[in-house]
Image: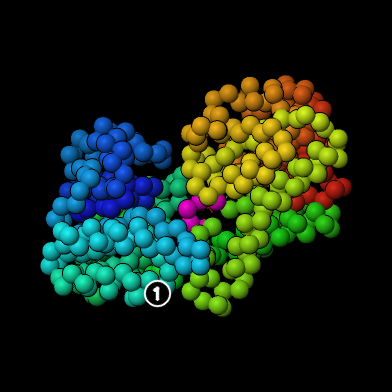
Amino acid sequence: MKRITVLGMGYIGFPTALLLANSGYKVFGFDIDQNRINSLKLGKLPFKENGLEELFKKVKRKKTFKPVSGLEASDAFIIAVPTPHLENKLADLSYILRAINSIREVMEDGNLIILESTIGVNDCDKQIIPLLKKKNKRFLFAHVPEKAIPGNTLYEMVNNGRVIGALTKEAAAATKDIYSSFVKGKIFITTPKIAAAAKVMENTYRDVNIALANEFAKIAEDLGFNVWEAIELANKHPRVNIHQPGPGVGGHCIPIDPWFFVGESVQAELIKKARNINDSMPQKVAKDVEKLIEKLDLKNITIAILGYAYKKNVDDARETPAKKVYQLLSKKYKVLIHDFYVRSNFVVSNELNQILKQSQVAVLLTDHDEYKKIIFRKYPNFKIVYDTRNFFSIDNLKGSAAKLFKLGKGPNENPDSH
Ligand code: SAJ
């Protein structure tokens, strides 16, 4: 195996392609987006990730990575395209099937096809393998679900364990050969179906756990205790790991993948409930902010949303709950959105001070580290700071007339004394 084509130059495909090129493979990076290919050819990074720029430069020197807008013959093809979900919650395989169709044009006997995109448990058997078989060529196949977390992608791609769901022993060996060129974590061999199930279970586990934390936050408000402190103490137990409440769940995986179980099986009742709890958090946050504004009888106010990315310290806003919070609040109020990293025409990235000067209410949605530097007493205009991540401390509000409210704290603990 010498030549590898990676299909999809996104958050997973691009770093994977670079790691392989760095290991000495001749790698073609394919994307249907011509603009992305053009900018990769110019050496521009499509997004920020720790260590990605250095790796890109290194690989450029080695001349082992070539961005392409058409497929060429290759020994292996790795598919890393998105899998959204459909209306009926099943995985939307259209990007994957399109990728497979284009591979079929250039496929040769003995080629290895690897699928990294997340899929439903039955998708390989029912759709992907049958489509590959239509070409009447001998092929090897493995489903190797991606496991890397945005923000720490390169590190996790190298150090996490990987599951290879191979169709045959030969496919398992060929796939292992490729991944062991850069993976330091353990490699496990299984079937494509189990690999898919394990992957969807991982993200479902997190989603259900976050829903539980969000439910605890609502119970805490109802019963009058501080959920953050209670979770911290509960997690001292050696077998308890409750996740954190927040404004909802974003990203390209956790809000989507659990639906695949719901779409495929009527048994997925808890999963469906958890998804709905997490999806309803932006409404809850918007409503709570509205109630506070009404209670303090504030008029003609401007709200500053702090953070638009779906999680801290990344520039990724896919499925961000901030979008919904913004849409709901802007029906009634003037809302300005700030984020240090997200580039968009309605998100301001470099004028935090200006935004803070104009606003009376701050709603922290994404806990980017840099927001810790805000000193609210410098902005006497502030009346309310609503924190969905237990991020601000009394220090941030010392000397300020603003009141600090937190998601998941009972009325007696809100506002914090300062
Ligand atoms: N969140 C909470 N409370 C928490 C943890 C997270 O509200 O306690 C929210 C975050 O704010 C964010 C969302 O959940 O909006 C998801 O963030 P995340 O950091 O948990 O996960 P992702 O989507 O960035 O990446 C996940 C990872 N999966 C797991 O941790 C099981 C990653 O390893 C996967 O590669 C990725 O999904 C994927 O591609 O499936």
Name the residue that disc number 1 marks.
122
**Against 149, is 316 above or below?**
above
Quarter occupied by the N terminus: bottom left
Left or right, 299 with reference to 177: right
**Nearer-the-camera pick, 358 or 114:** 358
Q: Who's the residue at 55% across and 33% down the image?
A: 347
**Against 215, is 322 above or below?**
above
Say if residue 32 shows up in the picture: yes
Snapshot quadrant of residue 147: bottom left
Specify start and end residues of the magenta stretch as a single range: 250-254
* Other-residue count near label 1 (Cα within 10 Å), few / some / many at <14 / 14–19 / ≥20: some
From the image, give the main secondary structure of the stretch colored magenta.
loop
**Against 359, is 342 above or below?**
below
Residue 18 location (% of width, % of height): 28, 45
Residue 196 location (% of width, % of height): 40, 69
Q: Who's the residue at 33% across and 55% down the image?
A: 80
Amino acid type, residue under disc 1 in the picture:
Asn
Quarter occupied by the C terminus: top right
Left or right, 79 with reference to 118: left
Is 253 magenta? The answer is: yes
Say if residue 238 shows up in the picture: no
Snapshot quadrant of residue 306: top right
Residue 94 location (% of width, % of height): 36, 60
Is 294 magenta? The answer is: no
Q: Who's the residue at 27% across and 74% down the image?
A: 130
Question: Secondary structure under badge 1?
Answer: loop
